[in-house]
Each structure stands twice: as C-alpha cells, then as structure tokens.
Amino acid sequence: MTPTRGTNPAPEDDTGLAEFGYRPELKRTLGNFHTFAAGISYISILTGTFQLFYFGFGHGGPAYWWSWPMVFIGQLMVALSFAELAARHPVAGSVYNWAKKLGNPHIGWLAGWMMLVASIVSLAAVALSYQLTLPQISHAFQFVGDGTGPYDTATNAVVLATVLILFTTLVNAFGVKLMARINTAGVFIELIATVVLIVLLAVHIVRGPGVLLQTHHTGAGQHLGYLGAFLTASLASAYVMYGFDTAASLGEESLDPSRNAPRAILRALIASFLLGGLILLLALMSVGSLNGKGLTTDGLQYVVLNVLGDTVGKAMLWCVLIAVTVCALAVHTAAIRLTFAMARDTNLPFAARLARLSPRFRTPVLPAVIIGVLSLSVLVLNIRQPQIFSVVTSLGIIMIYTAYLLVTAPMLVARLRGRWQPAGGGRFSLGRWGLPVNAAAVLWGAAMIVNLAWPRDAVYNAAPPHHWYLRWGAVLFVGLVALGGFAYYWCVQRHRTGVLADHAAQPADGDDDATDTPLAVPAHD
C-alpha cells in the first residue's frame, strides 16, 4: 500500500513504533526526495571534499585519491546493514534505537551517547568549513586579523561558524517543514553545482589519470613508508562518507519510511561516492600545477579558482557555501532527533523537557537550542588551536564510527544466534549476503577506529609545542567521553530508564502485549 500524498500517513507507517513502546507523535510530512535529501546533505559532497582535500593531498599526494573508493567500499557494508535495519525499524534516533533493539539498553545508551557527542562535535566541524570558503570569496570575511597571524584563521573560523550554528538552531526550532524546504532547495542546488563543476573541470584537464599514481614522496620518513602516509591521508575521505543513517533517523516524520529510508541511505552514499570521486579526480587532472602551495593550504578552493578563474570560480564557491549550510542543518537535525529519542526513554537528564514537542510545530525545540550551545562551546574550547580543523573533525569521526560499530557488532551477534529477522513484505533485505556483509562492516569499523585514533602528530599536534597528551588526544578524549558517560549512566541514569508516560504507546483493548516491552515500564536491573 502506497502512502497517500500530502501529509496524511498510511496506517502502516506507525505500526513499528509500538514495538519500541512509543506512540506516534512527530508530524509525517517528508516524502521520498526529502528523505534522500536529508541523507545526502549530511554526507554533503561539496562540504567534505572541499573541507579536507588539503589534508589528504598534503599527507598522501595525488595517490591519496585511492582512499576514496577504499572508504566507500567499507562504508557501503555499513550502509547495507543499516538499510536492512531501516526497513525493519524506521525510528527516530536510529543508531540508538537499533543498538538497543539488537543488543540491550546499556549498549543502546552507549551508542546513543557516542553518537550524540559526535554529532555536537561534527556540527562544530562542519560549521568551521565557512572559514575555508568565505575568505576565498572575499577578504572582507576575514574579520580577525589578515589571516597571516598564528591564530587568525582559527579564531575567524570560530566567528563564522558561530553565525552558521545560530542559523541552524533557529531553523530547527521552527519545525521540520521549514528545515525540509531549506534542505531540499540546498541539496538541489548542490547537486546541480556538483554536475556543473565536474563538467567545467573536465574541459580543463591538462594531465591524464596517471596522476593518481604520484605520491609526491609523502612516505619518506614514515614508519610504514607510503602506507603510513596513505592511512593518515585517508581521514580526508573518511570524513565525507558517513551520516547516511539520517534518512532513517527521520523515519517517524517520513511517509512510507520502511521503503523510502533504505533506498535513501544507499542512494545518498552511492551518489556521493560517484560525484565526489569525479570532483577529486578531475581536480587533480585539471589544476595548473601539482606543486602549488595552495593545494596543501587552501585545497579544492584553490583548484577551483586556479582552473575556472575568479568570476566562475567564486560563483562555484558560493554553491559550496550553500552545501556547507545545508550539511550543518542536517547534522543539527539528526542530533535533535537522537536527543528526542533518548529523552523519550528517560535516558538523558531533564528528559521530560527535552522530549517535549512544540504544540505548534510538533518538533523538539529545547534540544535544538542545547545542541547549538554545546557546539558553540566546542568551538570556544578550540579557538586558539591552529589545527582546529583536523582535530575537531577527527574526534567527531572517531565517535561516529564507534557508534556505528555498536550497531553492526550486536547485529552480527544477533545473526549468528539466529535472532535477526529482516523485514518482510518485499522490503529491503540482504538475504544470504547478510552475514558476510555484516561481518565486513564490523571489521571495517574496528579497523578505521584504530586508524583514526592512532596517536599522530600530523593530525593532533602538527604545530609546536609538541605534547604527548595532544598526540594521544583522540584516545584520551574518546575514552573519557565513553567511560565517563557510561559511568554516569550505570550509576544514575539506568535506574530511571523507561518510556515517559506522555510518549508511551497505549495498549489496545484486551491486548497486553504493548506493555510487555521492557522499555514501556521503568527498567531496573
């Protein structure tokens, strides 16, 4: 049965919520393209490729491009597993609720906590992208110094990022419909601009694809030779291809989510891989010189201006700015839905207030404000950090990959124990490929977490003075977030867990099953 057009959901859209002990509350207004747009705007082809090209090229040379298909294949294993979950459980706070369902409430809380903190950090990281683009358009956007001082760039980045976060906070506070309109328009512009950019770069190529074999001697002095350099540079690709689960996290606000969400997850990832890969390849083939200093400082922004000239190049950079804006909006939106999902289960402090919906917009307003404030605090803490871009980005990525692993690992255990049942009725299913794909997703996630958190000066302490605690910053920060957060949950929050009465599903007459779920009542050990 196809859902009716407009804002009227089909009856089966809400049937899966009772399985979690929830009643339908969020407004179903998002169609197929809205769901796809949410996933692809979080990945954001132009945001990710433009933000960290300088890092990938600087540490791995042109050959760093091969990390793009490597990351895609690994993340495709994760996305396929998530698509199967989205067909079975299209619910707000996807990663949190999936981990809870596949594992137990404790694993679910840790996955949700890691994803929530990661989303707050990622919002700050995405907002910092304004600094990489706006001053390239006009020096008038360099409000702090002239950009040559040791802290000019980092401090100005915080100023610009603050403006963007304030904007995403206001938009999300006014409801999902406004967010969807802005997001859809932004994604449409981003996709058109991406295709145009690919064509323009293609007609200006000056060298062949053999450029992808050049390493620029970046492996010299590395413990593992070029492999070590390549693994460091792969951060640039790892940063782009995540966030596709957003399509499922909006499942309670989408029409026919069990069919639309899996398609949106896969389409967003595949489209990002193809279009982003072409941009990176053609940029390397068309830039005037591969030895230009701007490649390792300004990245793709330098390439666009170098190849297309001032007028056309700056027009493309305005499109990049739009992409960054809708990407930040998508990250903020996903974090709000996750906060709402955890608060609905009394799994956050002040849960009743955090889970309260605006009577007019039917969206959580307080989480939008709190997430915005916390993201701004991340920026303030790093305001004089010259490596602000790579440090903040890396921390966000590691925690998101960890949260993903806390879903794929319990899913693999459930498969091995015969407890996993994919959705029926012709919905997405991996069939016999489920086990190998799931196993590959777990191995990939674990390997990338180790790679991303590895204590490298190049990522966490590139500029002097060098300190051991900065080099090990990722391990220390992520460990503190995970252990400290879980200690709080175990000692305090788990004793309060249970669906808030205002959000709990109402049992049908004569049906006691709706109250059997452990989340429909306070869950004490």
Image (cartoon, rainbow, N blue to C red):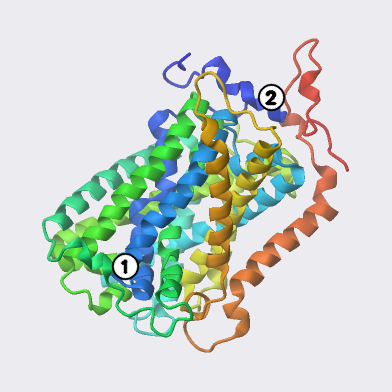
Task: State the SS at label 1.
Answer: helix
Q: Give the labeled residue for mark 2.
A: 18
Q: Give the labeled residue for mark 1.
A: 63
Residue type, mark 2 in image: Ala
Residue type, mark 1 in image: Ala
Among all residues in the image, which is located at the extreme top?
510
- Whether residue 174 is visible, yes or no, is no
Q: Position of residue 343 (x, y in %)?
A: 70, 42
Query: What residue lies at 60% left-to-right and 22% top-to-bottom?
Result: 14
Q: Is residue 83 above or below residue 301?
A: above
N-term-proximal mark, 1 vs 2: 2
Left or right? Give the position of 195 relative to 499.
left
Query: What residue lies at 41% left-to-right and 70% top-to-bottom?
Result: 230
Q: Quadrant of residue 515?
A: top right
Considering the image in quadrants, where does the C terminus appear? top right
- Whether residue 100 is visible, yes or no, is yes
Q: Is residue 30 above or below residue 153?
A: above
Using the numbered discs, state the Cα–Cα distance from disc 1 to disc 2 in whole angstroms.
50 Å
